[in-house]
Image: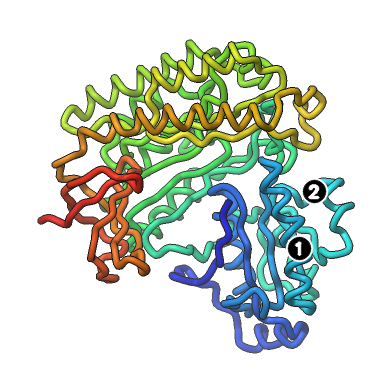
Amino acid sequence: MLEKKIGLFFSYNSIIISGIELRNNIRKMDRKTYYIITIGCQMNKSDSERIAAYLEEYGFSLSEKREEADLVILVTCGIRQSAEDRIYGLIPQIKRDNKNAKIILTGCLSERPDVIKRVKDRVDIWLPIKELDSLADKLGLQKINEYSDYLDVVPRYESSFSAFVPIGNGCNNFCSYCVVPYARGREVYREVETIIGEVEDLIKAGYKEITLIAQNVNSYFAEFNGKNIDFADLLKMVNDLDGYFWLRFATSHPKDMSTKLIQTIARCKKVCEHVHLPAQAGDNDVLKAMNRRYTIEHYKGLINKICEEFKEQKPDALPVSLTTDIIVGFPGEIEEQFEKTVELFKEVKYDVAYVAQYSPRYGTVSAKMEDNVSAEEKKRREDKLMCILEKTLAENNKPYLGKKVEVIFESIDKKHGNMIAKMRTAKIVKLPNVNDEKLIGKFGKVKINKIDDFGFVGEIVN
């Protein structure tokens, strides 16, 4: 779970507002500070950056403390019960610590009838993210700009060197456990020109890492110059832009991972050697109950193609890093079926796996199924997978020892005075006794000296 203050670290393409118009808006509402709490995925983080930009158009500024903010915005996640429960704890806490604050609730829980009923007396404004442009009206402010799509709001990126660029919103897949199609609606994708324009602005501003995001990037489609464009085409177009930067994407659905896309990923030099491909389960009957629409044999075939294509196209590079999402304890999942997920882990040897214990989500198909795997058993299964992951990760990391690799310097661990850097494969390197803030956001080379629980320990080299 992620709680972040969204502030203005860097601004570009700022919208110019006349001083008179701005003052008139501010007079209409004395509250002029905001604080954003973001829970959940990369898309929620990107949404928060647009909310921050929208509020700053109207003269609001970031409050360093939520206890002192006039507006507290909760960008919610409904993927897991733990994320939902956190909101129920936060709302009374905010009201207790800041009685005068207006609470705005957006994100995945903003249209859930049961959530609205439970906390309606403590939330001042309910704001489905697609209706961001209505926020000025809800706050009693005179409209400055009109946005037909909230993604047209120019974000206030939290980072000055790494940015998420949404290529669309919504999902058509209706996995039986997932609320996203209900919370965000059907898939709607941005125009190619709009996406390319946003990335070009970021490159000109010196950004070093671009991540294209959507609920399912693989489903992207648009028309451009009389041609049908899919995600592989879009990825290549971004890769071919001038300037050097790293290019990432998330999240992919196995049923839409084409051979064309795999080849494009491996051949594009700016696309990083890291593929996140959620499996969710290792058993075909469980996958069918989840409505995932692929078999585990198909999934393993994709993994083999990815590894082979990267090895062929980038023979001198380190092996591609593979990460996944898994749900344990799905309704009806028996031990024999879970053991197939264990086999999958041993065979694929993931670098990272995000393992979640199943929890029924309001309004989904699986919520009507009997949640018949105990909490204790779900925890046992999660622990077993994590033990396998720990062993395979140690094996995967051995080839890095003694290697010189490219990194981007991300942050400083001020408590220990160490620099934290990230590789193209998304692996983390700790650089002891390096605390030069001028390095943050820049590329560099490091030598890997040691493997530890954190990831790696290394040193900067020329």
What's the residue type where badge 1 is placed? Ile
Q: Where residue 231 sits in the image (x, y, percent)?
A: 46, 33
Q: Is residue 243 left or right of residue 77?
A: left
Q: Nearer the viewer, residue 342 or 149?
A: 342
Report the amino acid beneath label 2. Glu
For residue 218, side relative to residue 127 (left or right) = left
In what element is the residue under mark 1? helix
- Percent across and percent down for residue 140 are 80, 75
Q: Which mark is residue 91?
A: 1
447 left or right, relative to 289: left
Mark drawn on residue 140: none
Q: Residues within 10 Å of mark 2 (few under 14, many from 20)?
A: some
What residue is drawn where x is 55% and y is 29%?
326
- Residue 74 image position (x, y, % from top left): 69, 60
Residue that appears at 72% across and 55% down: 87
At a point 51% along the width and 36% down the height, the residue shown is: 354
Q: Position of residue 270 (x, y in %)?
A: 29, 42
Circle 2 sits in a helix, a strand or a loop, which is it? loop
Q: Earlier in the sequence, mark 1 or mark 2?
A: 1
> 376 or 321, which is in the foreground?
376
Label 1 – label 2 distance at C-alpha: 17 Å
Q: Which residue is mark 2?
A: 111
Up the image or down, 360 lies above or below 139; here it is above
* Residue 110 vertical placement versus 432 (above, below): above
| Residue density around tag 1, few if under 14, some if 14–19, many if 20 or more, within 10 Å | some
